[in-house]
Image (tube, rainbow, N blue to C red):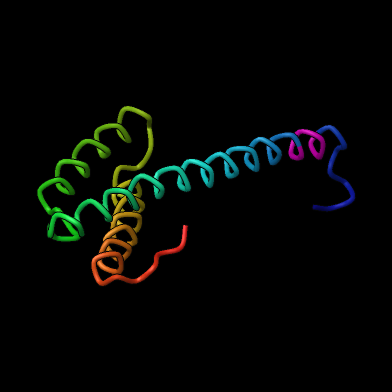
Amino acid sequence: MSDTTPSAAVARLHSIRESIDNIDAALVHLLAERFKFTQSVGVLKAEAGMPASDPDREKVQIQRLRALAVDSHLDPDFTEKFLGFIVSEVIHHHERIAAGDEVGS
């Protein structure tokens, strides 16, 4: 920012960024909680001899979350990409659990 930026704008920017930082922290905590549950699912699937991925559930989840994104005024394509990244990581963890590898939290 230039020296000519009004101090009120700088203060407002700082306040908005603090809110963004708080949301980022909440997202990290929510993802950690989500992965705790998906780890349990991975163990259950491995014990039951079930496959690591469930394409039918993934399709339903994508449809559900795309609709939530639209309702929340969030780009549904972005939402699907974000979910796709998370699901691919979960599947990777499930495969490692099934193979007997320890998966970090």
Front residue (pair 100, 36)? 100
Q: Is residue 70 left or right of residue 74?
A: left
Q: Please, which residue is most extreme toward the top here?
A: 71
Residue 7, horizontal then vertical, whole percent? 87, 37
Q: Does 26 sit above or below residue 50?
A: above
Q: Is residue 11 magenta?
A: yes
Residue 44, horizontal then vertical, whole percent? 23, 51
Q: Please, which residue is most extreme toward the front here?
A: 47
Q: Does 41 sit above or below residue 104?
A: above
Q: Please name the residue shown 45% across and 43% down the image.
A: 33
- Specify the principal SS of the magenta part: helix
Classify residue 19 by image quadrant.
top right
Front residue (pair 84, 92)? 92
Classify residue 60 by image quadrant.
top left
Count numbered badges in the picture. Answer: 0
Front residue (pair 96, 12)? 96
Residue 27, horizontal then vertical, whole percent? 51, 43
Q: Please name the residue shown 47% across and 57% down the image.
A: 105
Residue 52, horizontal then vertical, whole percent? 19, 60
Q: Please name the residue shown 35% across and 49% down the image.
A: 78
Q: Is residue 40 left or right of residue 50?
A: right
Q: Please name the residue shown 80% across and 52% down the image.
A: 1
Q: Write the start and end of the magenta stretch as one range.
A: 9-14
Front residue (pair 104, 27)? 104
Q: Is residue 95 magenta?
A: no
